[in-house]
């Protein structure tokens, strides 16, 4: 159960007393909240929640929870006073209170002082200490003060009370800090009568003094420090005691700090102990700070030589040392910074000079002559000029935290200190790059702004001027915000928001006196405008705008950008921006609403609010992209409804009117989807009173059903969510809801989308929780039998009726789910059904005690269903196995116990056989089966044959003991088998790969171990030898397979033949593939030996013996070829399983760090051996699958080692790391490290060692490693080997990719980038390759994972200031590298300088862009890069010039682009120039082109000013037109210049100057016309394809020519005007590029006209072109062009061009139809698809015209039908089947649903079979297209009555049912039921498929090709089709009158079905007893055939009137599957 959590909690004095009362009376833990707007969830106990309201009309009833809920609902708009609920102790463990104890002496004292009556204080304490329950002791502790108050009245303090107070002091100091008793005792003693205070203080002082004196052990200091801390915290007696002992306490703290820090230094490397010591150190410093802050004894500090002063000086000196010690945790350094400032403040006099002193410390300008001696002595390191940045940072934090900034109390010196502090912080921000320090810096800056606000309240005018919005400080703060608002750390981004908000508040305080309007303030206006100019991809823009809205209101922003709501909603398609956008919108619409309400006198303001915020929302919901809609619904819609719930009716009203017109489709939700989403959100957030109200008032039942089977998955999910979700967890589920849920489950289990499946299961689980919790309310109501008001929803029917409905509903749901687990059901169906069943088992547990449950899953599971769950373990998908196993484990243990050992023996034997299967998923099945059998009590008796000794059962819990004993038995059995197989594999690895791949055994052992609680074993002595043997066997297995895995080429080792000669060849192969890619890879030449010269004797010592038998026998004695793939799979999977087993052993088994430890199973030596094993295989394996999974196991080991208390084990990772780094550096030729394959497992090995290092430490290993690797990866001289460099680059790549290192790795990014760029220039290919991979990883690490198709999308870019502020070292490096490249990129001598690094430099720079928020005087300006990038465009390499052009674009501000383009154009040569280089021209033109393209894509192109700028660019372009003409001999530069002209025509197409378009005014079109007229398009092409740039030139010229033709056509209208070139000329070009571009342009126009999207239709230029295309289609030989022509003909009306066939192509219409069908039959798939579409359109045209033409094509219809049928096969390409579906949809009214069938019945049914086949396709797009066919068929006048979904968009699952319903209805209409019934029965029976042939073919594939993957349809379910077909045929035969079948046909059908039935019986008999596990695929196929046969037999029995007779039912003897038959559906329709 959940409750509402207060959004606004206000202390009103009511909550605390109520909570205390309930805690006292009903025990902890209760919580009480007070406030309003309760939202959120907190777990609580069922039936333990009370709501108290103000102004309720009727009281609450504690005995009637349902009535309380109704009262709460009826007053939801009132203020809630209290919500009191018992916390969820069911899900959260109760707080354990350790009981208090006293020493023996105190106990005896209490006994001696206790009175006989037991009423004095000693008696009370004696009773208290004798209790063992801490919670009970709390009650006695609370009675102490009342008892003393009674004694106070007598005015005596006798010795008894004194002794008791002394004992109480001892008790208090003996309790731990977190013990609740300590706080209770302190709270009680705070109320001690004043009379006893002196005595109590003396007792506490005495006891504390004793603690201080007796505590001499280093590890006992923490307890004393905790006691001092607790005494200071809200405990008056404790504070007084500490004050009395101040000198001793300070001395103790100083001593403890010295000893702890020294011990920490000595134990360097022992992470666990160091962590504890550093924690103690931190606590000590905090207590010291608390002491100075809270104790009033420091007025004596002026006595310089006093002990207190000396201790203070000593502490200050230590804090100063801690502050600069980088070996300590940063939290210690930070706290030390606070302590240093606080101690200086306490020790320095006079106080008014403190700011000046601290300023000098921060500015590192301490004057030794004027500074106090104690300061110079204690803070010597802080008084010098060389103070570490971190120390300065923490001193700034201490300054801001420990000094009093309120109301400017420190005066002018305080203001100076404030400014000095921020300047120091600004300096540090450019120096600090470590992520944790950056986080500290951001928090300190935010703290500084808070302090500045406090000072500004009463500051001097000079400070206000210094902190004004226009001041330098504020500007630099804004720069910091702009630089860091995109920082990867969320917390740092949050700090920038705080800083920005405080900046606004600071500015407001500085201008308050002027009284000006803040929204009109110049600083605010400029800030707002600059933010609005930013791109919306910037996350910081949203937070800053939100702050501005809070300060100046939304009206000002809406005035500047009226469409800003729509702009923000458009951004919400990007998931990374959605939270920011939704928060900004919420801030804006809330502010807007409050302002409108305050200004309006009536409710008319709501219309403006709706228009501004709701209308854009509805527009997006109906027309936005899929992602955009989803995010808007999830994030924006709930906030909008919470702000104004009344808007729901407005939204529903609009959407209801649109739902009929916009029903949606598979890729669009439509208005119906938007309506369901709105209603779902409203109900989930409590804006709908109840579900019934929603159905009655807002949406109809028909709409709900449409939504539940809508074609778009999200509409279905939203509709289901509307039914399942409710803000009230106890709301009764109505009957209608239950019916609709059942309807939904029928059609929606088989969803291919994992996300949809997860949502369905999650929503149904919510529904089940509602049922369970509301049933508890109903049980209460039923028990109380109280009367309720008639209006109460829960009393509309008797509770017992609702409970019975619940039971029936849940039982029905379970029946449906188990029916869905039929043979052959798809993976999605099984996953959904099992997940939902698991949820049911979880939500409705077995009742315990008085708890009642409305339903139990076990009541609906019989033996057949239990067997079904067991068979789910056999699937190929592990997720299904997991779900089935978990569900079996959730059932009652007595329910899943097998009776008798025969069945268990069979299952266990099956599991053993599966564990040696060559199919990997079989061993997974074996593992789950064994884990299930382990829970069987009868298991040991069935395993007597496997073990020689009996395993003793433990004495503990019987169930746990049985499981442990069984697990031990199973592991021993598996281990015995594994040892035998390893021995055989040592003799013949080929035999092992073919017959017994050993990895299955190891997998089963690992699976059994993982499910056992290994930390609480009872049979430890039995386990130890097993573990030892397991380790030895694992090492042996690894030794057998490692030669293959560690070879240079693990793939493809073994020849396919297995004769005697191949054995010797195998020896030679294994010798040759020994690792040859080690450290001498690049330096030693590899000479291949002759075949006869291999030394087989040497080989036998290093590789296992290979069996030389002539053939390899499989499991069943059959000869089989051992392929290389089989050997490799056997080897790498064995290595994988061994690695996972060893990792699991380290992770799960308790470690025996000392031999005497009784419970440990792993010894230290064994752990070291496992580590050595991982090291060897990670560093030597070459197969990726092997070392990747060895890495997984090794990570588990390293994580254990880092937490291990054993120091020698703890230091192993460091030793291994240093060892491998040394091996990498030494470059020893004898090393076996792999130098290829990206260093193979070496990066994984180092990654595992570093990633498991504790993140809270100093990460010393990471620092050491990165230093070494970056040193190796850097530039080296030629004498050194390159192998270490390759290793270093590969390892760096792995480390930068590791997400676990997070921001810790960021400080090394700059050095890594340098190494990658410099490495790219290496002459060695391996170094360049590794550098490229590293560079790619760094780009992802810096700029994020690519989130868009555009390579340079701003989602993956960064402003220059942000980039260079994060990586300042890269600024001079990149600039210098780029300058070097640019200066030599194009030498005067003509020498080619490729400069490999140019590519990487431009790639980095291309991802940077200038921000409008960047300061003009930034030291990291991007301007110096621009000239160098431009010069890179002169490169002789084409790709480099293109890269330079792309990189230049982001460097140029959008408003500077036109001027930059003009500058570049001016640099181009004139036609009269004699000397120029085409490379220079090309580079410049590319830069112009990309700049112009970026400008044309921006929003600026609609700005009039920039349009004029572009007109000026066009003028400049005209001056260089010779570059586009033949005067320019280079086709490449001509092509680019023509592209520029084309872009300009696109940009200036709508701009006018006066009454004339700009392009005409400039004479642009005339010049373009001359260019085209003089081009080769008109004069012909003298070139061939060997001319460089010809294809690009042709394409550019053609695009420009087409644009010119369109422009002339648009200006001419219907008049005839000359065009520079006609389409006919372009289409007759001999170059396919020209024809293809022309056809694409024409196709776009014709398609637009055909779809009625074009308002003006086709231009006159395109009229009557059908004949032209008709001529072209027969001549065209280019495939793509032919496709385009066919598409164009399909778009055109056949009546326009079909009559011209004889004139144009000399073919009659019939002959042309035959020609198109021939193309559709024989051409490639894309042409075939278009030809099929065209053929179908021609046929449809003939069908619509006169009878003469119809009769003309009638003979060809059968050929067309065969063509369609042949296009629907699953083996065909998607395009072919999609075309067939579209054809069927377009011809459905003519051939599928025509009341007078044109085709014969067989052909018509063949087309319907195509529709049904396509509806069962695995591909979603094909199913959706087939669904359109059925939708078209159902919308015809004669079929729309067949179903209620005639005009709805439904999904394929329900469409299959609907299609069969329509078909059966049509057979009745056509009166063709009698001839059609045999065909449909044939479909049911599977005619055309030979059962024996199918079985033999499937068996042959599995035996001969074990690794071949045949075409499998994972969506289609044969029995679903059988179910629907049977249902509709049964209804048809039962309800209609029809002519009976002829006896011959009936006999033929019966004979066929009977023969099939007999054959099935024979096939079932030959299956083994556990066929469901051993022959899963065969059994599944047979069961499917069995169900088909039974369904046909039942229908035949109905035909004969013999339904129900037993003669047609297979005997259980013949069919093991008879008990599990598919439950065929009832006769009623589902729709």
Image: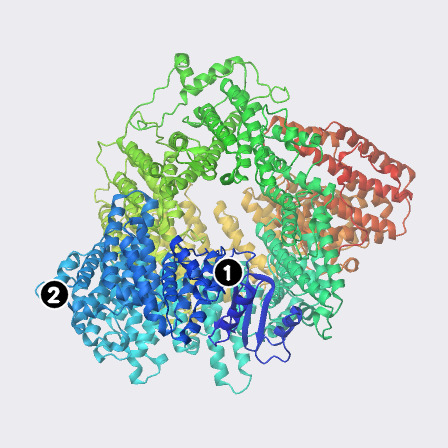
Residue at horizontal 74 percent and vertical 68 percent from the top:
785
Side (left or right) of 597 relative to 1442: right
Looking at the picture, how far across and down is residue 217, in whole percent? Answer: 29, 49
Looking at the picture, how far across and down is residue 537, in whole percent? Answer: 41, 61
- Circle 2 sits in a helix, a strand or a loop, which is it? loop
Q: Point out the image quarter for the N terminus.
A: bottom right
Please count the marks in the image: 2
- Viewer-closest of 1252 and 279: 279
Circle number at residue 371:
2
Outermost residue toward the left in this view: 369
Side (left or right) of 1666 relative to 1208: right
Pair 1/2: label in front? 1
Outermost residue toward the bottom in this view: 601
What's the image's color scheme? Answer: rainbow
Q: Characterize the local packing of mark 2: few (<14), some (14-19) or many (20 or more) Cα atoms within 10 angstroms.
A: few
Query: Quarter-wise, where is residue 1551 in the image?
Result: bottom left
Seen in the picture, residue 2022 relative to 1596 is either above or below; the reply is: above
Q: Characterize the local packing of mark 1: few (<14), some (14-19) or many (20 or more) Cα atoms within 10 angstroms.
A: few
Looking at the picture, how far across and down is residue 1908, in whole percent? Answer: 58, 31
Side (left or right) of 1754 relative to 201: right
- Circle 1 sits in a helix, a strand or a loop, which is it? helix
Query: Which callout, 1 or 2, points at the residue further toward the start of the chain?
Result: 1
- Viewer-closest of 688 and 1448: 688
Query: Quarter-wise, where is residue 1511 in the image?
Result: bottom left
Circle number at residue 136:
1
Looking at the picture, how far across and down is residue 425, in whole percent? Answer: 24, 63
């Amino acid at each position: 159960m959940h409750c509402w959590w207060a959004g606004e909690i206000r202390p009103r004095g009511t909550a605390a007393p109520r909570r205390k009362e309930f805690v006292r009376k009903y025990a902890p833990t209760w919580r009480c909240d007070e406030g309003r707007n309760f939202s959120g969830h907190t777990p609580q106990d069922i039936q333990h929640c009370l709501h108290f309201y103000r102004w309720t009309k009727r009281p609450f009833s504690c005995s009637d929870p349902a009535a309380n809920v109704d009262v709460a609902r009826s007053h939801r708009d009132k203020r809630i006073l209290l919500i009191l609920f018992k916390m969820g102790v069911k899900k959260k463990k109760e707080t354990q209170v350790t009981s208090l104890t006293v020493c023996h002496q105190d106990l005896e004292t209490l006994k001696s002082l206790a009175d006989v009556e037991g009423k004095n204080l000693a008696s009370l304490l004696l009773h208290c200490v004798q209790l063992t329950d801490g919670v009970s002791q709390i009650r006695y502790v609370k009675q102490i003060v009342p008892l003393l108050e009674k004694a106070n009245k007598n005015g005596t303090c006798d010795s008894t009370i004194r002794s008791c107070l002394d004992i109480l002091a001892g008790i208090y100091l003996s309790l731990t800090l977190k013990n609740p008793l300590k706080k209770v005792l302190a709270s009680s003693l705070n109320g001690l009568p004043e009379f006893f205070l002196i005595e109590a203080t003396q007792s506490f002082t005495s006891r504390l003094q004793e603690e201080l004196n007796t505590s001499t052990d280093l590890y006992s200091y923490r307890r004393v420090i905790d006691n001092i801390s607790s005494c200071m915290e809200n405990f008056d007696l404790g504070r007084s005691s500490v004050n009395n002992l101040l000198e001793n306490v300070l001395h103790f703290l100083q001593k403890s700090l010295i000893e702890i820090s020294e011990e920490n230094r000595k134990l360097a490397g022992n992470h666990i102990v160091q962590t504890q010591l550093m924690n103690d150190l931190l606590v000590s410093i905090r207590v010291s700070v608390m002491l100075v802050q809270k104790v009033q004894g420091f007025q004596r500090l002026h006595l310089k030589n006093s002990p207190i002063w000396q201790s203070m000086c000593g502490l200050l000196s230590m804090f100063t040392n801690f502050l600069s010690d980088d070996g300590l945790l940063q939290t210690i350094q930070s706290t030390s910074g606070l302590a240093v400032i606080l101690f200086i403040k306490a020790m320095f006099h006079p106080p008014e000079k403190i700011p000046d002193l601290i300023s000098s410390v921060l500015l590192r300008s301490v004057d030794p002559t004027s500074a106090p001696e104690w300061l110079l002595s204690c803070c010597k390191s802080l008084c010098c000029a060389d103070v570490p940045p971190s120390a300065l940072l923490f001193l700034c934090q201490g300054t801001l935290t420990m000094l009093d900034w309120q109301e400017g109390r420190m005066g002018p010196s305080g203001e100076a200190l404030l400014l000095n502090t921020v300047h120091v912080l600004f300096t540090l921000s450019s120096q600090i790059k470590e992520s944790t320090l950056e986080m500290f810096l951001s928090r300190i800056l935010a703290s500084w702004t808070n302090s500045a606000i406090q000072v500004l309240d009463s500051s001097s005018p000079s400070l206000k001027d210094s902190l004004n919005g226009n001041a330098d400080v504020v500007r630099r703060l804004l720069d910091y915000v702009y630089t860091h608002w995109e920082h990867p750390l969320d917390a740092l981004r949050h700090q920038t928001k705080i800083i920005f908000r405080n900046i606004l508040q600071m500015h407001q305080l500085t201008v308050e006196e002027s009284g000006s309007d803040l929204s009109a303030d110049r600083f605010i206006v400029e800030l707002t405008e600059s933010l609005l100019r930013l791109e919306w991809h910037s996350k910081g823009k949203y937070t800053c705008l939100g702050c501005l809205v809070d300060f100046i209101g939304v009206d000002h922003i809406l005035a500047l950008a009226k469409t800003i709501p729509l702009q923000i909603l458009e951004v919400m398609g990007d998931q990374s921006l959605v939270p920011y956008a939704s928060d900004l919108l919420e801030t804006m619409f809330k502010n807007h609403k409050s302002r409108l309400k305050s200004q309006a006198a009536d409710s008319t303001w709501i219309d403006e609010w709706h228009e501004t915020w709701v209308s854009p929302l509805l527009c997006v919901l109906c027309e936005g992209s899929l992602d955009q809609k989803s995010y808007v619904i999830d994030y924006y819609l709930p906030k909008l409804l919470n702000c104004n719930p009344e808007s729901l009716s407005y939204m529903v009203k609009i959407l209801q009117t649109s739902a009929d017109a916009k029903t949606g489709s598979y890729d669009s939700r439509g208005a119906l989807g938007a309506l369901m989403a709105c209603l779902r959100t409203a109900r989930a957030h409590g804006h709908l009173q109840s579900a019934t109200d929603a159905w009655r008032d807002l949406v109809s039942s028909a709409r709900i059903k449409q939504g539940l089977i809508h074609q778009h998955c999200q509409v279905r999910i939203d509709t289901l969510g509307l039914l399942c979700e409710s803000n009230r967890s106890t709301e009764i589920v109505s009957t209608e809801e239950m019916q609709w849920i059942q309807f939904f489950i029928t059609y929606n289990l088989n969803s291919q989308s994992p996300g949809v499946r997860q949502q369905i299961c999650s929503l149904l689980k919510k529904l089940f929780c509602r049922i369970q919790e509301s049933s508890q309310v109903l049980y209460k109501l039923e028990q109380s039998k109280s009367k309720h008001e008639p209006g109460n929803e829960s009393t509309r029917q008797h509770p017992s009726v609702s409970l019975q409905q619940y039971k029936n509903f849940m039982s029905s749901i379970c029946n449906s789910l188990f029916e869905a687990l039929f043979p052959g059901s798809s993976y999605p169906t099984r996953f959904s059904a099992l997940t939902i069943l698991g949820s049911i088992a979880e939500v409705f547990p077995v009742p315990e005690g008085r708890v009642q449950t409305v339903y139990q899953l076990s009541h609906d599971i019989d033996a057949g269903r239990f067997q079904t769950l067991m068979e789910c373990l056999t699937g190929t998908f592990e997720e299904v196995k997991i779900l089935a196993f978990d569900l079996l484990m959730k059932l009652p243990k007595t329910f899943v116990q097998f009776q008798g050992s025969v069945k268990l023996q069979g299952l266990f034997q099956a599991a053993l056989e599966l564990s040696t299967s060559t199919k990997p998923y079989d061993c997974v099945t074996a593992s789950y089966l064994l884990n299930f059998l382990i829970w069987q009590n009868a298991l040991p008796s069935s395993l007597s044959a496997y073990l020689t000794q009996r395993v003793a059962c433990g004495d503990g819990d019987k169930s746990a003991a049985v499981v442990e004993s069984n697990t031990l038995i199973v592991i021993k059995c598996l281990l015995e088998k594994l040892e035998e197989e390893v021995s055989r594999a040592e003799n013949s690895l080929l035999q092992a790969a073919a017959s017994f791949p050993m990895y299955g055994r190891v997998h089963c052992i690992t699976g059994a171990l993982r499910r056992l609680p290994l930390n609480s074993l009872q049979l430890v002595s039995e386990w130890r030898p097993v573990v030892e043997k397991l380790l030895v066997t694992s090492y042996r297995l690894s030794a057998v397979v490692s030669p293959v895995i560690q070879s240079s080429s693990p793939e493809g080792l073994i020849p396919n033949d297995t004769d005697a000669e191949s054995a010797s060849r195998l020896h030679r192969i294994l010798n040759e593939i020994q690792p040859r890619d080690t450290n001498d890879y690049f330096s030693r030449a590899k000479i291949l030996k002759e075949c006869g010269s291999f030394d087989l004797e040497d080989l036998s010592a290093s590789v296992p013996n290979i069996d030389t038998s002539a053939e390899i026998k499989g499991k069943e004695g059959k000869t089989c070829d051992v392929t290389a793939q089989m050997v490799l799979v056997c080897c790498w999977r064995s290595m994988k399983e061994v690695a996972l087993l060893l990792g699991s052993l380290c992770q799960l088994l308790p470690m025996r760090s000392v031999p005497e430890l009784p419970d440990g199973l792993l010894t230290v030596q064994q752990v070291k051996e496992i580590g050595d094993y991982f090291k060897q295989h990670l560093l030597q394996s070459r197969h990726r699958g092997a070392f990747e999974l060895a890495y997984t196991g090794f990570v588990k080991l390293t994580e254990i080692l880092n937490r291990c208390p054993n120091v020698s084990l703890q230091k192993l990772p460091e030793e291994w790391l240093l060892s491998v780094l040394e091996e990498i550096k030494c470059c020893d030729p004898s090393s076996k490290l792999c130098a290829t394959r990206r260093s193979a497992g070496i990066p994984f090995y180092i990654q595992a060692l570093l990633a498991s290092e504790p993140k809270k430490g100093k990460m010393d290993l990471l620092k050491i490693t990165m230093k070494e690797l970056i040193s190796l990866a850097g530039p080296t001289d030629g004498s050194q080997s390159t192998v270490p460099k390759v290793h270093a680059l590969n390892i760096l790549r792995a480390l930068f990719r590791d997400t676990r290192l997070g921001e810790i790795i960021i400080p090394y990014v700059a050095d890594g980038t340098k190494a990658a760029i410099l490495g790219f220039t290496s002459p060695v290919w391996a170094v360049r390759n590794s550098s490229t991979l590293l560079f790619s990883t760094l780009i992802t690490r810096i700029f994020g994972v690519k989130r868009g198709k555009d390579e340079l999308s701003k989602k993956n870019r960064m402003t220059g200031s942000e980039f260079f502020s994060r990586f300042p070292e890269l600024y001079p490096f990149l600039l210098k590298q780029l300058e070097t490249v640019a200066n030599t990129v194009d030498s005067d001598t003509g020498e080619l300088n490729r400069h490999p690094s140019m590519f990487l430099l431009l790639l980095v720079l291309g991802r940077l862009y200038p921000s409008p928020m960047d300061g003009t005087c930034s030291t990291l300006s991007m301007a110096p890069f621009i000239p160098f990038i431009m010069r890179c465009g002169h490169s002789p390499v084409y790709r480099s010039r293109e890269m330079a052009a792309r990189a230049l674009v982001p460097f140029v501000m959008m408003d500077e682009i036109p001027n930059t383009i003009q500058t570049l154009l001016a640099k181009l040569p004139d036609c009269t120039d004699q000397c120029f280089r085409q490379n220079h021209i090309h580079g410049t033109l590319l830069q112009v082109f990309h700049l112009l393209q970026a400008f044309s894509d921006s929003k600026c192109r609609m700005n009039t000013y920039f349009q004029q700028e572009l007109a000026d660019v066009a003028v400049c372009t005209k001056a260089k037109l010779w570059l586009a003409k033949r005067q320019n001999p280079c086709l490449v530069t001509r092509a680019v210049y023509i592209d520029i002209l084309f872009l300009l025509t696109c940009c200036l197409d709508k701009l006018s100057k006066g009454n004339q378009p700009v392009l005409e005014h400039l004479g642009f079109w005339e010049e373009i016309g001359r260019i085209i007229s003089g081009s080769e398009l008109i004069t012909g092409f003298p070139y061939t394809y060997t001319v460089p740039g010809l294809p690009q030139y042709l394409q550019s010229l053609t695009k420009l020519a087409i644009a010119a033709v369109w422009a002339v056509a648009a200006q001419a209208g219907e008049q005839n005007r000359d065009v520079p070139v006609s389409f006919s000329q372009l289409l007759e070009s001999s170059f396919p590029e020209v024809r293809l571009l022309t056809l694409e342009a024409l196709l776009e126009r014709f398609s637009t006209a055909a779809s009625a999207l074009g308002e003006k239709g086709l231009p006159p230029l395109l009229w009557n072109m059908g004949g032209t295309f008709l001529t072209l289609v027969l001549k065209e030989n280019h495939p793509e062009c032919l496709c385009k022509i066919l598409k164009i003909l399909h778009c055109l009306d056949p009546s326009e061009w079909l009559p011209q066939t004889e004139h144009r192509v000399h073919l009659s219409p019939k002959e042309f139809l035959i020609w198109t069908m021939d193309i559709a039959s024989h051409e490639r798939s894309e042409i075939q698809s278009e030809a099929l579409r065209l053929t179908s359109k021609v046929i449809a045209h003939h069908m619509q015209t006169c009878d003469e033409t119809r009769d003309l094509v009638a003979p060809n219809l059968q050929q067309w039908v065969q063509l369609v049928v042949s296009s629907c096969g699953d083996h065909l390409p998607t395009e072919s089947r999609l075309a067939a579906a579209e054809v069927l949809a377009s011809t459905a009214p003519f051939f599928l649903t025509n009341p007078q069938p044109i085709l014969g019945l067989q052909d018509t049914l063949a087309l319907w079979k195509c529709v049904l086949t396509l509806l069962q396709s695995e591909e979603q797009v094909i199913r959706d297209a087939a669904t359109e066919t059925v939708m078209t068929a159902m919308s015809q006048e004669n079929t729309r009555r067949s179903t209620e979904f005639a005009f709805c968009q439904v999904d394929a699952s329900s469409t299959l049912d609907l299609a069969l319903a329509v078909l059966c209805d049509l057979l009745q209409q056509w009166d063709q039921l009698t001839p059609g019934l045999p065909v449909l029965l044939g479909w049911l029976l599977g005619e055309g498929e030979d059962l024996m042939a199918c079985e033999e073919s499937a068996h042959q594939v599995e035996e001969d090709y074990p690794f071949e993957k045949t075409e499998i349809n994972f969506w289609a379910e044969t029995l679903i089709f059988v179910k629907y077909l049977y249902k509709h045929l049964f209804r048809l035969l039962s309800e209609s009158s029809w002519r009976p079948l002829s006896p011959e046909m009936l006999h033929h059908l019966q004979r066929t079905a009977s023969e099939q039935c007999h054959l099935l019986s024979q096939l079932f008999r030959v299956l083994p007893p556990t066929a469901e596990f051993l022959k899963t695929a065969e059994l599944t196929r047979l069961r499917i055939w069995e169900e088909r046969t039974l369904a046909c037999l039942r229908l035949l029995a109905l035909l004969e009137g013999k339904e129900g007779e037993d003669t047609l039912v297979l005997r259980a003897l013949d069919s093991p599957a008879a008990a599990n038959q598919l439950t065929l559906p009832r006769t009623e329709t589902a729709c």
